Image (cartoon, rainbow, N blue to C red):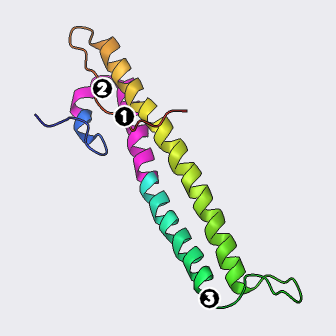
Amino acid sequence: MDSFLAVDAERLKPVFEDVPQAMSELQTYQNNRAQLRTSAYLGTAALLLLGTGLMMQRTPVDVNSGVIQPNGYLILTGATLGIGTIVHLISTLATNDLHIEHAIKYYNQAHPEKPIEPLFSTGIHF
């Protein structure tokens, strides 16, 4: 049997539709998933900036004057953007699992006669 937990949990909407708190948690989960997609694009841009800066034939800092060269700015920008993106991705993944868990909890409280059990986790916990 196919799982109700698709990548964006869209198939859970009909199950949770009569429990407003569960629907709210599901909506938050889906909004966060959309943000993850944007973060993946930012991570790609960071790698491109970093790679471009590293491929340039100059040193990142002028050894005589100590001035940062254009490729140094690319490297710094790419590295900073990449680190920020990784931190955002990890924290969003860790907290996003909680939204699904809360939605299931609210559903189970509203329907104790037919509880559902989560079978999915990213496995990222802090």
In this picture, is 51 found above or below 104?
below
Residue at the extreme top of the image, as rendered: 113
Q: Earlier in the sequence, mark 3 or mark 1?
A: 3
Q: Residue drawn at (64%, 91%), measured in percent from left and top?
A: 57
Q: Is residue 68 left or right of residue 115?
A: right
Q: Which mark is residue 118?
A: 2
Q: Which label was assigned to residue 108?
A: none
Give the x, y percent position of residue 123: 41, 35
Query: Can you identify the residue that label 1 sits on?
Result: 121
Residue 101 at x, y = what percent?
39, 26
Q: Amino acid at mark 2?
A: Pro
Residue shown at 62% from the left, 81% from the top: 53
Q: Secondary structure at mark 2?
A: loop
Q: Quadrant of the C terminus?
A: top right
Residue at (51%, 50%) from the top-left corner?
A: 89
Q: Nearer the viewer, residue 29 or 77?
A: 77
Q: Is 118 above or below relative to 72?
A: above
Element class at badge 1: loop
Of circles 3 and 2, the one toward us is 3
Q: Are marks 1 and 2 in contact (CB under 8 Å)?
A: yes
The reply to whether the C-beta atoms of the residues labelled 3 and 1 are less than 8 Å apart is no
Q: CA distance from mark 3 to mark 1?
A: 42 Å
Q: Is residue 87 above or below residue 121?
A: below
Spatial distance from mark 3 to mark 2, Cα to Cα? 49 Å
Residue 55 in percent (x, y) is at 58, 85
* Element type where label 3 sits in the image: loop
For discs 3 and 1, the disc positioned in front in the rendered view = 3
Q: Is residue 33 magenta?
A: yes
- Give the residue type that dot 1 points to: Ser
What amino acid type should be assigned to the residue bearing mark 3?
A: Met
